[in-house]
């Protein structure tokens, strides 16, 4: 009973089908017929014109998006617990040629207007100081929490007022959207680009960089090739994305994962470190308690000395999640 | 009848099988059981200890390898027609942080001792000049030609004498090895790292960076993550590589592609721009002749104003290749 | 009566003399007779073999030093108020190709063993996290405070234990050494490289990068040229440094600046934000009080909403400093 | 009798005077009164509004200019013998974050419409190829030759047609302008930025980046600080530039150097490798001949196995130049 990571989950059968259906010769790179459908397919999801590039990882997607917004001498305001800050081995420093991440706080790994304004106000406007060029959000956050549309509106309003571009790391954007129960465009808010995650949600090896501002996509195309992310058999990447969008499979999968997380949370109510709004459950859990859970066959990561993280995925069995919830409750 | 590129070829059924067999939860990134087998599996191919990293593209593989050898203030001697120089949108400049490519000539896109020595001898040994740190070979070359083991020995001997590290871009290393009929180690020669290509030869989305000098792999691991190339479901990448090595599928596929190219070359003997030693046929072909071939259903790229390139793949049908050869002969 | 910055101070007459004496043809760049004397001249100051490069600014000196210690995928632990973090427009990100600054706290802008260990201990040892490669100190600190030799020993001991290289930003190293009254080697401690500042202390346009580990200097030479910092008339830079070392002019100038700062501090005892250990005085000072001081002819920078910074230089007149101290006391 | 390099020349007395006059406290960095005069002073030279930044070296000036024009995934067309290609240790690769230099030929180290068009036409317009973003000229060229205004017009016309920005490396722009006898604006042509050299022409340590398109200067200001080239006592740099412009000292000095070179050329007419149009004389000279000249007290650099380079400077004594010319003639 595995709750290590949604990265460990299986590939959805419809994704397999779509990949195999794509196994016929076509123009290499992104010149194939499937890649050509992406702008329209995602445009339908967001209700507007968008430009979409596939990329193999969330790290690449985040960095390719940010590279269109931030000059090497600029900076990106992000949460101090964000993935781009702590879990990408300095990839933004690489892709942005040394631009700076500017760290703001906020409960549950969510930026607040106050925390961001505090960072921005402290930047003296002269050539000795790196100036912010963009703001980056994580939806759902690293703590599994979800920005409400009005929170996003307040933050992007601040960004626009200060002349900043906006980016969303949506590794679990599907889970956030499912939680909010609003259209994708509202779960995203006023972003210039969204890294829309699929690998944790049923795909095998493809994320999407969705440029809500399509004019930014041109630079990203050059940078993607330059970063070695323009796969020659791109048709298999496009196929994954189209399968995930088809019939809103992405939402169905996310709902399943969220529901499984809710079952876990049911048994952990008094232990929760953060509200469970997506597919991750963070809770206090002492080393002996963790050992007890593992002895019952549950796999998960320690989260610091006295906590644990349990992640549900699209394919988490309901009975497993319920069992885990009960096991936690029984500790 | 498609001869556009081996990138257009299908994924081998055994690769599909292996990927689907890998579709069970395992540790993310490269912590899975399959990735753990790569060093040994490739070690068996090369008859020595090696360290192996998967990467999604040849561009990434080349750059990750070179990044372990070349400091930002250094340079890489390579052929002026090499892929790293002309077809990667400056990826080496990105991954090597501005290091320089130093271009040497040579027939059939192969370096020669003379051409390389000419480049090296012209570099004044002072701080105003970028100094060469590595030499990069392409096996088979961009013109579809193959370095013989003794040619490699002479060139790597020069490299060692001048203190240079060595790298091989082996996007079509399988085809070169099949042509030479020697063990992989001899087709590779004294390289510190080899970008061993599989995507053009039956895989879907995975190349291997083989560090013949395993000590170099450590830096590459950091750089791979930093470049967004550490896929979270790495088990599907390792599965592809293991399937390709199993029973020497890589060699069988390459032999098939080479054989198909030979059929094409049979009809183009007087038109060949380069000896046909791997799976590519470059020949003189006027615009009306190209039109005539296309009218017969053959797909291929123009190669400058008066030539054409035909690429055979592992799945090229023999009858198609024979038909193309005859059609060329009949022009 | 100017207390804006020691950057505003004049060039010492002996520096002028030395520069003019250097105004005869010699080999360009650093091939001149004066540059050739630097290793020995600084070696005498530090009582050991060193390798020395001139550089025009502290930013360049810091970055050239750090570039020899930190790989692009690594990081530098430094104080969150350090100059490299806040006042160099991201220069370390540029010179280190995207490496990360890792911020530690500590009173008076000085690192502590606890603050540094806290940063280091939080870095999970896996490929997703940037690892620290070096530790950077500022002597005297941005708050004008001085590390004692035993503090340095504890910190560099930690650095060595964790495998980190060490760098000191010594923009005001002279003032720190003068304050401590110990040999330069003790004021520096176990550093691999020191950015030894002279521009704030009587020179015109030259700092020194002193490699206490001379093996690191070779890479710095390439990087200096590559950064456009290898001036062709380098003899004028070497001349400045030699003049500053001659007869310990650097120490005499620093003592004068420190003494002037002490006069100011005499009148500000109850207002001090930090102990006055070098040539800077930071004290609480309300806007009306600042206005009152300016009305008396004193020039200085505001330091946040309710404080002021007064900097003394080698050429600050004693009567001016005394007057300022009295004016503050009279507020 | 030194003809090694104009870098070896002395600092002009008026430059010394101006520097010493600047030795009074003023706002640090480029906030001083002298730096504030630069835009107008150079605007008068070029007869138009310009924005001017000082920088310590030609390498820095070139790179700061180019960094405003070329994205990291782009390229710069330049002559294969240009300084940025061969003599700056890869500085453009550093400052432009891995952008590519694209080498064109042409006699006497001057680009031609044909050579540049050849380079540009060979760049396939797709994402696999680095695209040219700028064109860089050297005036006078590395071979001491001068672009005529009509040559510049043809080349910049091509640049504009292809959407390229334009940059001039004017390390010896003064000598070129003096040779042409036209206003500076005509010697420069339709450039977006000019690296206007002074160090070889009587200054000590300051070049000027002249933005003929002032809108580009903003980015350069950030990049200058980020590169450690924003000297804190910038007033001494501005003073040098103003002294060089005052009374057209730059032109007078250049004329003197050119005249001295002409004296040398008088004796070398049959040996010249390139027309002598500025202050450099390149001529065939066998090793024994070089030895003979050195035995007579002449200093100069070998230029390959059978040639020599003699450089005259603003302070070259006429009798020395005449003597050298005669000595060559007598070989």
Image (tube, coloured by chain):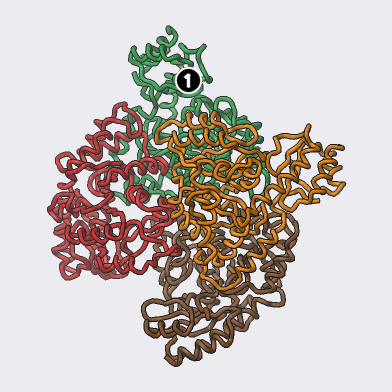
Chain colours: A green, B red, C orange, D brown
Image point (57%, 83%), residue name? D258
**B45 relative position to C166: left or right:** left
Query: What residue lies at 63% left-to-right and 72% top-to-bottom?
Result: D11
Percent from the top left, x then y, of residue D319? 57, 88
Q: Which chain carries label 1?
A: A
- Tell me where residue D256 appears, x and y as whole percent: 61, 83
| x, y percent for residue A272 | 51, 16
Q: Where is residue D193 in the image (x, y as percent from the top left)?
A: 59, 66
Decide if residue C149 is on the left or right side of residue A3: right
Q: Vertically, is D12 above or below A131?
A: below
Q: What SS does tag 1 mark? A: strand
| Near-viewer residue (D36 or D159) | D36
Position of D158 relative to A216 (above/below): below
- Outermost residue, bottom side: D330
Q: In which quarter of the image is the N terminus of chain B?
A: bottom left
Label 1 crowd bin: few (<14), some (14–19), many (20+), radius 10 Å: many
Q: Toward the viewer: C321 or D88? A: C321
Give the mark count. 1
Residue named by callout 1: A282
Q: Can residue D188 be seen in this view?
A: no
Quadrant of the frame with the C terminus of chain B: bottom left
Q: Nearer the viewer, residue C241 or B19?
A: C241
- Relative to residue D288, is residue B56 depicted above or below? above
Instruction: Specify whether B320 is left or right of D311.
Output: left
Does residue C210 show up? yes
Quadrant location of residue A288?
top left
């Amino acid at each position: 009973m595995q709750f290590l990571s949604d990265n460990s989950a299986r590939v959805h059968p419809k994704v397999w089908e779509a990949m195999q259906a794509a196994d016929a010769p076509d123009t290499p790179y992104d010149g194939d017929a499937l890649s050509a459908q992406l702008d329209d397919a995602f445009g339908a999801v967001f209700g507007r014109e968008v430009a979409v590039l596939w990329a193999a990882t969330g790290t690449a997607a985040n960095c390719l998006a940010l590279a269109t917004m931030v000059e090497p001498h600029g900076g990106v305001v992000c949460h101090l617990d964000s993935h781009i800050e702590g879990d990408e081995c300095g990839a933004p420093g690489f892709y942005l040629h040394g631009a700076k991440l500017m760290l703001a706080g906020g409960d549950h790994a969510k930026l607040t207007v106050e925390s961001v304004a505090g960072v921005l106000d402290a930047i003296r406007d002269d050539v000795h100081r790196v100036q912010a060029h963009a703001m980056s959000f994580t939806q759902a956050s690293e703590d599994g929490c979800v920005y409400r549309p009005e929170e996003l509106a307040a933050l992007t309003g601040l960004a626009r007022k200060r002349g900043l571009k906006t980016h969303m790391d949506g590794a679990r954007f599907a889970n956030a959207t499912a939680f909010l129960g609003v259209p994708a465009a509202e779960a995203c808010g006023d972003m210039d680009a969204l890294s829309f995650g699929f690998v944790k949600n049923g795909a095998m090896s493809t994320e999407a960089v969705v440029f809500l501002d399509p004019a930014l996509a041109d630079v990203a195309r050059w940078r993607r090739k330059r970063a070695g992310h323009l796969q020659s058999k791109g048709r298999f990447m496009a196929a994954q994305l189209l399968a995930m969008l088809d019939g809103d499979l992405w939402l169905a999968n996310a709902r399943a994962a969220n529901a499984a997380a809710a079952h876990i949370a049911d048994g952990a109510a008094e232990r929760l470190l953060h509200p469970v709004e997506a597919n991750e459950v963070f809770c206090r859990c002492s080393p002996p308690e963790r050992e007890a859970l593992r002895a019952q066959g549950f796999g998960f990561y320690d989260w610091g000395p006295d906590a644990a993280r349990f992640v549900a995925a699209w394919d988490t069995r309901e009975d497993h999640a319920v069992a885990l919830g009960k096991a936690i409750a029984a500790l």
